Amino acid sequence: MYGRIQDVAALIGRIAIGVVFLVHGLEKWNAGIDATAQMFEAVGIPLPTVAAIFVIAVEVVGALLFIVGFATPLVGVGFAVVGIGATFAVHLDAGLTGEGGYELVLVLGLAGLALGVNSGRLALDHLLVGRRRSDRTAEPVS
């Protein structure tokens, strides 16, 4: 019973985190790679065009994968990189809380990482990989 609750909680968490990243990614997508790269360059992010493509890909494609639970460890690492990058490049000077603070981007990135490695059984990762792994580790029936 408790395992089911954990799986549902992980699913809800993945959906919530994924939707927030998706919305932010779509804003950057709609602004365009050039505009996003210019904003990144203005705050001192190196290789701003490469960074813009990476962030848009993580926030859009990664968010969709995260919501359905596919490649969640990889996406979780991407979310952590984006969240920590945003913390240091944009929000750090504003402090933890308040206008422009880094609490949201830090929590989103690290929650994405945590849910990425603990995505639950209601994820495609579990259906495609987890079941096979548990079948191999199960004791043979005599």
Image (cartoon, grey):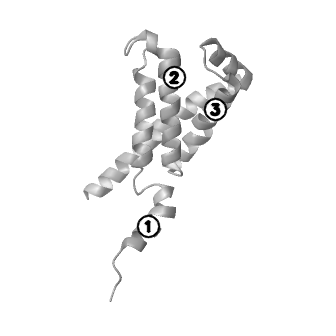
User: Which of disc 3 and disc 1 is earlier in sequence?
Assistant: 3
Point out residue 66 in the picture as x, y percentages from the top left corner. Answer: 51, 45
Query: Quick one: quadrant of the C terminus?
Result: bottom left
Q: Quadrant of residue 64?
A: top right
Question: In the picture shown, does residue 128 fall above or below 138?
Answer: above
Judged left or right of residue 32, residue 4 is left
- Closest to the observer: 108 or 74? 74
Mark 1 sits on what residue? 133
- Residue at the far front: name it: 46
Q: Amino acid at mark 2?
A: Ala
- Closest to the observer: 14 or 90? 90
Query: Quick one: quadrant of the N terminus?
Result: bottom left
Q: Residue at x 36, y 53 (%)?
A: 7
Labelled pair 1, 2 in contact (Cβ < 8 Å): no
Q: Real-space Cα distance between discs 2 and 3?
A: 13 Å
Q: Nearer the viewer, mark 2 or mark 3?
A: 2
Point out residue 139 in the picture as x, y percentages from the top left corner. Answer: 33, 78
User: Which of disc 2 and disc 1 is earlier in sequence?
Assistant: 2
Badge 2 element: helix
Q: Residue at x 35, y 82 (%)?
A: 140
User: Which of disc 3 and disc 2 is earlier in sequence?
Assistant: 3
Residue 20 shows in the view: no
Q: Real-space Cα distance between discs 1 and 3?
A: 32 Å
Q: Residue at x 59, y 13 (%)?
A: 43
Mark 3 sits on what residue? 56
Q: Residues within 10 Å of mark 1 (few under 14, many from 20)?
A: few
Q: Real-space Cα distance between discs 1 and 2?
A: 36 Å
Q: Amino acid at mark 3?
A: Ile
Badge 1 element: helix
Mark 2 sits on what residue? 86
